[in-house]
Amino acid sequence: MLATGTGRRLGVAVVGLGGAVATTAVAGIEVIRRGANRLEGLPLADVSVPGMADYRDMVFGGWDLDASDLSSAASHHRVLNDTQIKETQDALSAIKPWPAVGSGAFCRGVDGANKFEAPGHRAAVEAIAADLKRFRETSGADGIVMINLASTERTPGDDAALNSLDAFERALDRDDPSIGPAMLYAYAAIESGVPYGNFTPSLAADAPALKEFAKSRNVPVAGKDGKTGQTMMKTVLAPALRARALHVDGWFSTNILGNRDGEALRDPGSLQSKLDTKGSVLDSILGYHVEDHLVDIRYYRPRGDDKEAWDNIDVSGFLGHKMQIKVNFLCKDSVLAAPLALEIARVLDLAQQRGDGGVQEQLSIFFKAPMVANGHAPEHAFHVQERMLMDWLGAPQ
């Protein structure tokens, strides 16, 4: 059953609007708006919370380096079936991405003609903020949020410019090369009072300077790196292995995917950003270091959006006997990710209505590397994360 909404119109400004995840999300809302009652994959579809926007009341805009309208983009990505493409064609063809801020230095191999060539960081921030203001005015939305669904950027080095808001402001003024597009979008959102969610592994609102900025402006932020397939299974299985005192001797994970996200990960810098978030969960859950925890990601064009994740888990049980667990998850990357991005947007908007600014830890269930407010270790166990979110949603206001 679709949870009853409040009539609140929610605008979602998407960085990477023409990508597979974003086009799947927008098409999904259009299908629901047209009367579909198939709500699998939407974790909060049966959760009715006062103030949370209904799926049907979500509207979309955003940026992409490719200027193709969303119907053309969706046809290119081949996530939706022919019936869904036809059903959503009119609505999606009316949505065209705004020129995007991009950087070849941060995301090699991902470029396009629909780029805003800003003369500097401040000009880029001003342009993004102007887009947000125009979107708020033209969409008729009661509130707007920003969701980053762009390609993965490389992680900058340990730069002092990112460690405090004062240093970051000075770095913006001098166009410091350690500041990438994801950080510029996050800064513009926070400056504009717009909640921000980072579904990518790119460094953005989790930079200390931007966490400080969000807290000072009381703007909700969350991230990073959406937890969709293999890592979701890891955070479900690892707590069970710990509860049964089965020692994990090694965990080998490999992924193959052929979509645009996979292509971006061919760049070693972007790949390392992804591996850093995927590799961080096991030790925290198990309570000890798994020395042979290996993660491998490969771009394999024939698969397109049909990702395959394969895990081999070596465990020791009673009297030291060795056993193995094999998990083979053949999934559709964007079909798993799109509904999570929608839920993140709805919860961020609700947090803003409640006056909850800064890092939103209750959204940890949706991320591989959840942001935390006060420097403590993030919670990774799936069942604990679910309880955190449900407790927050049900908290008396």
Image (cartoon, rainbow, N blue to C red):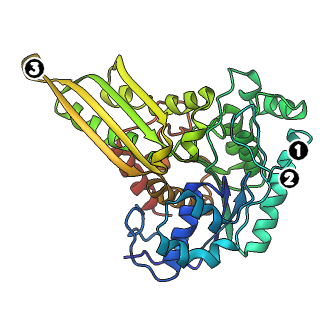
Q: What is the x, y in percent for residue 274?
A: 53, 33
* Quarter of the N terminus within the rendering: bottom left
Marks 2 and 1: which is nearer the front? Answer: 1
Q: Disc 2 vs disc 1: Cβ atoms closer than 8 Å?
A: yes
On the image, numbered disc 2 is attached to which residue? 127
- Give the residue at the far left of this rendering: 319
Quick check: 216 left or right of 227?
A: right
Quadrant of residue 323 within the rendered picture = top left
Mark drawn on residue 118: 1
3D distance between C-alphas at marks 2 and 1: 8 Å
Residue at x-position 33% and y-position 20% = 290
Q: Residue at x 80, y 51 (%)?
A: 113
The local crowd at label 1, few if under 14, some if 14 to 19, many if 20 or more residues have their Cα within 10 Å, is some
Q: Is residue 334 above or below residue 101?
A: below
Q: Residue 40 location, x and y as percent?
A: 37, 66
Instruction: Give the residue pinned by disc 3.
Output: 321
Disc on the earlier residue, 3 or 1: 1
Quarter occupied by residue 232:
top left
